[in-house]
Every structure is written in structure tokens, then in C-alpha cells.
Image (tube, helix red, strand yellow):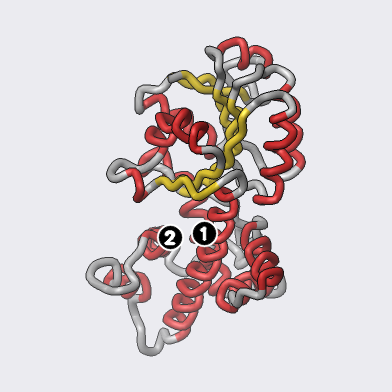
Amino acid sequence: MHIGIIGLGKMGNNMRARLRAKGLEVTGYDPHPEVTDVATLADLAEALPAPRIVWVMVPSGKITDDVIHDVAKVLSPGDLVIDGGNSRYTEDSVHAKFLATKKIKFLDVGVSGGIWGLENGYGLMAGGDATDIDRAMPIFDGLRPDGPRDEGFVHAGPVGAGHYVKMVHNGIEYALMQAWAEGYELLDSRKDLVTNVTGSFKAWQRGTVVRSWLLELLVKALEEDPEFKDITGYVEDSGEGRWTVHDALDRAVPVPTISAAIFARFVSRQKDSPSMKAVAALRNQFGGHAVRKS
């Protein structure tokens, strides 16, 4: 299979590399000449066999909207566009309806795995028609972790379902990171009693009920910078957490833990909180998100 990828940043570039390693042919387009395979979107379309599959991996919002409209100009009826960015699920139906006027198919896919996805594979949550899902399955199989398909990929429902599931996933992620961060701050506050905070977290990695990949990443961050002296406690929120709370409010579904985690991030913008340093370090570990240096 030969596909195109638009957007070769931290995620898109690694996805191109993983797919190639899995035996798929990939042509990538990016406005930065040092990473792109072709010079223009028209060149990308020309390089791909029809019917084409193009994976869009750019920041959500206006950039994604612009890219979908631009790529539609060079695609043909029967081609398939996959939005793998962190778009809000409400935008998916808009994009699908627009592309349908050009007789171009559309899937939305939530992608989790961050900068570690190249090595470990990506968790994928897809929305769209089953026929289009089947058509793109070699791509999903190339990107997902090795092992049973249903432990790294889900066809969650119609258009919009993939990004909705990813939105809730990220809301849960906010809450989990906040719990780890608060635990770190409490342990670190008892220097009179706990003399090995990093070792305490590391000891939880085997056999305990709280073992997880986030715990492993927290241990890695602590081993690199035990007191988080090199970063400030400022933490961004990228949108999905807020969207999760907004939708919960609309549906009267209680999400107090996720809501509290969102508000906790605002604390990071008021003072240099030790727990927010831990959250910032975790985001940097799994997603390569920028941190503010001390």
C-alpha cells in the first residue's frame, strides 16, 4: 500500500518512519523542505496511486480546516482523507460533508502514543464507514502496537466517534497525571521522612495496583532531574480536556476528577507548583511537549 501524509512534525515524521518500517510506501508533504518528500500538495497527489489515501497530521482548528480544503483541490472522487490530528469531534461532520461534495471519503482517527509511538506503536481510535475502515486497515495495522488488533485499535463508530473517544482519553489522561503529580508533591514534602522519592515511585513499577506507563515515565523524568530544577511548573492545556468537560456539562454527566485536573493546570500559571512541575515533566516525557526552563 502507498499512502500520503500531510504534516511531518514530531508525530507525522515518526508515523511515516514506522509505516515504512512495516513495509508500506509513504510519501510525505510538509512546508518545511528539510523533511518533505514532495514540494507541493499537487506533487503529493501525483505521486500516489488512485484511489488515493491521504493522512492529515497537523494541528487542530483552522490549520486542519485549511489543509482539508487545500488537499481536496488536488484529489479525485473515490479518494480517502484521514484526519489523524486532535480535531474536535464536532468538526468531523463538517469536514466529511464538505469532502462528500467532492465525492471524497473521510475518516477521523484519534492517535495516542506521543513521541514513543515510533518504537511502541500508536493507540488508534477510528470513526467512519466500515468500508473505509477496511480499506485503511493496512495503515492502522502498521501504526498500532504489535499484538492483538483490538488492544491497539478500535472502530469506535461513525464519523466523529474516533475523535470523541480520543477526547475522553485525554480527559482521563489529565486526571491521571494530576494524581501522580500530587502524590509526588506530597512525598517530596516529607524530606524529614522519605529520603528516596524516585526510588519509591520506581518500587511501584512491579506488582502494585498503580503500575502504569505514566508511572514509568514519571520515574524516567525523576531520574533525569530528581527535583525538577530545570523546568518551571507552568503547564498548558491543549483543548481535549476542556472539550471533555464541556460535553459532560451538556449531558449532565459528572466528571469531577477530570474537571479538577483542568482547573489544577490553571494553578500552574499562578505559582511554581511542585506538582505542576511533575505534570510538565510527564507531558514532556510522553509527548515531547515543550516545557519552560527555570
Residue visible at 67% across and 57% down?
239
Q: Which of marks 2 and 1 is in front?
A: 1
Residue visible at 51% across and 61% down?
281
- Say what amino acid the circle numbered 2 marks: Ala
Dot 2 crowding, Cα within 10 Å, few <14, some 14–19, many 20+: many
Q: Which residue is denoted by mark 1 in the rendering? A: 169
Q: Which residue is denoted by mark 2 in the rendering? A: 221
Placement of the C terminus among the 4 image quadrants: bottom right
Mark 2 element type: helix
Query: Which comes before the other along the chain, label 2 or label 1?
Result: 1
The single residue placed furthest to the bottom in the displayed view is 192
Q: Nearer the viewer, residue 148 or 261?
A: 148
Mark 1 element type: helix
Quadrant location of residue 140? top left
- Say what amino acid the circle numbered 1 marks: His
Q: Where is residue 127 in the image (x, y as percent from the top left)?
A: 55, 44
- CB of mark 2 within 8 Å of CB of mark 1? no
Please tell me whether residue 13 is drawn above or below residue 128 in the rendered image.
above
Q: Which of 5 and 279 is in front in this view?
A: 5
